[in-house]
Image: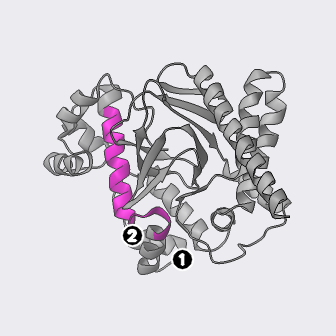
Amino acid sequence: MDARDDQRRERQTVMQQAYREELVERIGRVVPEDGVEEPLPGLHLARASAPTEPLHGVSTPSLCVIAQGSKMVLFGESRYRYDPWHYLLATIELPSIGQVLEASKVQPYLSLRLELPPTVVSSVLLEAGYTSPRKQADARAIAVSLLDKNVLDAAVRLLRLLDAPSEAPVLLPLVTREIVYRLLMGEQGDRLRHLAIMGGYTSDIARAVARIRQNFDQPLHIEDLARELGMSVSGLHHHFKEVTAMSPLQFQKRLRLQEARRLMLNENLDAASVAYRVGYQDASYFNREYRSLFGVPPIRDVQRLRGKTLAFSGQ
């Protein structure tokens, strides 16, 4: 029995290595130069031939798998590093910071990110017969786990659809649903169920996140938001930080400053104009907040970023 078990584990190891090599080959073929491509709806493939600086972006509900290299994602005060043996799962749209750690021209960073629409997660959840988490789950919106053979196998079959364009429209939704199911059955299943199920405070926090995102340039009145959600102010603060790793005000500030950066880069607006546009009444205070987050004043930051790619921000 032990010998057979050893042989089976050895075959699985060889197969998983072959899958990783196939991921490297297929992603490298689709993305021959540094950047990001979306060859199928919701499937994003990335390449970087050198480590990057920390880049600000927004995480979206997604599965992130690295074929080669490694990456760090900063979420609030927490850091999450992942590589070809680990996957990252994000379940709520939130500001985050991403940095490619290992990459070279010979062995570039290669990754895939598959969007996981909440409607699909909820549909698979109900179809599988789950109405509540099996145990108290970690409520964090981002976490890293070991990449098991079932998710890896599904990721490979997902990329194989790129060679079958006539089949992709039919099979892409099916493989996506399979991946969601595998995640629900895996290490992060309870957390994914916990956050997907309508009911409980996590759905309230999702509503709070959506409300703040929609009105990020308006004054944030915590008492009014808590009352709207039927929560106490202390309860809102506690649960919001448990899910997002930030307080509501920190979350709003991050959104404002990231939008300000985008406007200066893409619309050539000056710092003072941008400050008022994203909700700051004091331009000097905006400059201090901006420097605190990005490390340099707005003008220097924009000058530094012009000509650089932001393709690897977020996840």
For label 1, the crowd category at 10 Å Cα-Cα, with few meaning under 14, some 14 to 19 and many 20 or more, is: few
**Image quarter hosting the N terminus:** bottom right
Q: Secondary structure at mark 1?
A: loop
Q: Secondary structure at mark 2?
A: helix
Answer above or below: position of 231 versus 79.
below
Image location of residue 309, percent across then percent down: 39, 27
Image location of residue 209, percent across then percent down: 49, 59
Disc 2 and disc 1 in contact, CB within 8 angstroms: no
Depth check: give the residue in front, 240 or 156. 156
Q: Residue at x 73, y 73 (%)?
A: 132
Q: Residue at x 64, y 62 (%)?
A: 188
| Residue under numbered circle 2 | 222
Q: Is 167 left or right of 149, judged from the image as shown?
A: right
Disc number for residue 230? 1
Q: Residue at x 70, y 61 (%)?
A: 186
Depth check: give the residue in front, 213 or 97. 97
The first of marks 2 and 1 along the sequence is: 2
Q: Quadrant of residue 154?
A: top right
Image location of residue 103, percent across then percent down: 43, 33
Residues rendered magenta in the picture: 242-263
**Colouring mode (rainbow / by chain / secondary structure / one colour):** one colour
**Residue 3 forms part of the magenta stretch:** no
Q: Amino acid at mark 2?
A: Ile
Q: Is 46 left or right of 42, judged from the image as shown?
A: left
Is residue 181 something one can see in this rendering? no
What secondary structure prevails in the magenta region? helix
Q: Residue at x 65, y 26 (%)?
A: 26
Depth check: give the residue in front, 190 or 67. 67
For label 2, the crowd category at 10 Å Cα-Cα, with few meaning under 14, some 14 to 19 and many 20 or more, is: some
Answer above or below: position of 271 versus 136.
above
Q: Is 250 left or right of 102, judged from the image as shown?
A: left
Q: Which residue is outermost to the front?
A: 3
